């Protein structure tokens, strides 16, 4: 059975920057889609201080294509990422499209270039598959 986790990467358009790397002060939590996953981990009786901790976005890298922004292109793309236990991205793939190829490529780039803190399960870091929503909005 494959578990997906979900988080939202908001793509800001502040000060007209086309590429804005940013480190999140409070990383965005990514949680398993099914709450049963946490209950299962908690029932295993791990013996460390933090037996379960969800994966987090540690550093978010945003790419909003200048051409797309100038023509007013917006949308939400959903990207899947596979993480290793060290938090490194192994693979990224599109799940849903914005309807704009340039924004879809930028969403994949954002997911690949962001940095992650891996999930901890039974006191050890684990890899897994996660679902990330990348929101391209001119209002931000």
Image: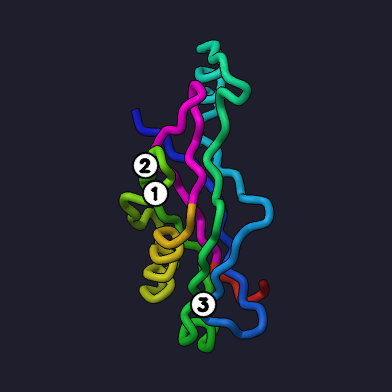
Report the colour scheme.
Answer: rainbow
The numbered mark, 3 or 2, whose residue comes first in the sequence reads: 3
Q: Residues within 10 Å of mark 2 (few under 14, many from 20)?
A: some
Give the residue drawn at x 45%, y 56%.
Answer: 78
Give the residue drawn at x 36%, y 33%.
Answer: 2
**Which quarter of the picture shows residue 15?**
bottom right
Q: Is residue 136 above or below residue 38?
A: below
Give the residue drawn at x 49%, y 85%.
Answer: 66
Query: Is residue 121 covered in magenta?
Result: yes
Magenta segment: 116-135
Q: Residues within 10 Å of mark 3 (few under 14, many from 20)?
A: some
In x, y percent, where is residue 29? Answer: 60, 44
Which SS does the magenta portion mostly show?
A: strand
Instruction: Residue under label 3, please give it.
Output: 19
Mark on residue 84?
A: 2
Q: Residues within 10 Å of mark 1 (few under 14, many from 20)?
A: some
**Which quarter of the picture shows residue 72?**
bottom right
For marks 3 and 1, give the one nearer the viewer. Answer: 1
Are the residues tagged 2 and 1 within 8 Å (C-beta)?
A: yes
Q: Secondary structure at mark 1?
A: loop
Q: Secondary structure at mark 2?
A: loop
Give the residue drawn at x 53%, y 74%.
Answer: 74
Query: Is residue 56 covered in magenta?
Result: no
């Amino acid at each position: 059975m494959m578990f997906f986790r979900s988080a939202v990467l908001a793509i800001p358009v502040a000060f007209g920057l086309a590429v804005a790397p940013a480190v999140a002060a409070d990383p965005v939590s990514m949680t398993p889609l099914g709450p049963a996953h946490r209950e299962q981990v908690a029932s295993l009786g791990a013996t460390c201080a933090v037996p379960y901790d969800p994966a987090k976005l540690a550093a978010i890298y945003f790419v909003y294509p200048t051409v797309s922004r100038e023509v007013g292109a917006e949308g939400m793309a959903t990207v899947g990422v596979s993480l290793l236990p060290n938090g490194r991205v192994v693979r990224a793939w599109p799940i849903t499209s914005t309807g704009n190829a340039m924004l879809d490529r930028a969403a994949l780039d954002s997911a690949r270039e962001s940095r992650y803190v891996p999930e901890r399960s039974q006191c050890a870091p684990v890899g897994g598959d996660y679902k990330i929503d990348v929101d391209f909005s001119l209002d931000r």
